[in-house]
Image: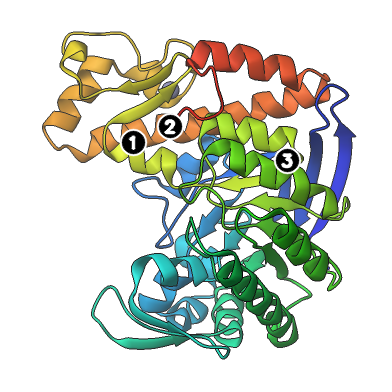
Amino acid sequence: MAVKYELIKECKQSGARLGRVHTPHGVIETPTFMPVGTQATVKTMSPEELKSMDAQIILSNTYHLFLRPGHDIVKRAGGLHKFMNWDRPILTDSGGFQVFSLSEMRKITEEGVHFRSHLNGDKLFLSPEKAMEIQNALGSDIMMAFDECPPYPAEYDYVKKSLERTTRWAERCLNSHARPHDQALFAIVQGGMHKDLRIQSATDLTSMDFPGYAIGGLSVGEPKHLMYDVLDHTVPILPANKPRYLMGVGSPDALIEGSIRGIDMFDCVLPTRIARNGTTMTSQGRLVIRNAKFTDDFGPLDPECSCYTCQNYSRAYIRHLLKADETFGIRLTTYHNLHFLLELMRNVRQAIMEDRLLDFRDSFFTSYGLHDNDKGF
Ligand SMILES: [Zn+2]
């Protein structure tokens, strides 16, 4: 198998697990956060900068690379690692989520999804087989099975039909995957917020023996306690000797709560997206650096942060850059936010090692200003 999970230890206090995922491009220490490089770049960050903050793996989007520049170009460049000059692990999603969230005029059939490009309106088609062809051409270490992510809320009957089709699609992905020796294909558990449907999806997919499992269809607008309920009854069905990936989740509280529930991998555009709007995550909670009160604040974004931004630049300077629409300001907030989440996950791993993740959660929530599970980021 292309990817192998190694359990190091379980936290005696929380049940969270510390592990390693071995991939063709190196080892990932878990639980881990994956920065998102949608268009074969983590917006404004160079690969060297990502390495300097010790990003272990990044995620890239099949839908976007399919539309532009086209997977054939990436393949001719020698694969995505060479194309973007990133020699550490890469995970690619299946394109399913973007088809449903970005494109127009989509039509779902058993065969696949017909849709129009959000860039130029071209008529396009994605299917399990096409999603495998594209990801095989990209050459990511971890590929995702083509799935449908139903909206929230959605009718029970629709969610049931959708997840059953997603399971049939997962089998077609398995059958058309051309590079199982050096690319690991993860399946995606769906089922909305319904306990029996989640159990059905997880049971059916685990019987097919994928090298890893993702939980999709969460963080789509539901209250966080619902997401944690779904994790509570889904994760125990997933095999203990395979990596578990919670898709699209990246708020600090959800990263900690997900780790407590046995999740190994997370990804989200949140840290990079809010950075571009001038919002930063700090040890004292959210900070909207564009606010006027920071005009003459010459302290760092986060006095407890050791990142490049906080060691060298002040809140006043960063605010000035953002107000003046200078790209460097966005680079500084992006660097800090990504470093903050990667550092948070290093602290989570350390707390698991020392059997004190629940204590760590409580003290983090207090300093971050979170007192219940439904607060934002
Ligand atoms: Zn910082």
Q: Where in the figure is residue 377, as x and y percent of width and height?
A: 45, 30
**Which residue carries the number 1 mark?**
275
Residues under labels 3 and 2: Cα distance?
Answer: 19 Å
**Which residue carries the number 3 mark?**
30
- State which tag comes first along the sequence, 3 or 2: 3
The one of 326 and 272 positioned closer to us in this rendering: 272
Residue type (three-letter) at the residue carrying disc 1: Ala
Is 281 located above or below residue 70 in the figure? above
Q: Where is ligand 1, by quadrant? A: top left
Q: Are marks 3 and 2 in contact (CB under 8 Å)?
A: no
The residue located at (43%, 72%) in the rendering is 99
Q: Is residue 254 visible?
A: yes
Q: Are marks 1 and 2 in contact (CB under 8 Å)?
A: yes
Residues under labels 1 and 2: Cα distance?
Answer: 7 Å
Residues under labels 3 and 1: Cα distance?
Answer: 25 Å
Residue 337, labelled with which disc?
A: 2
Q: Is mark 3 within 8 Å of ligand 1?
A: no
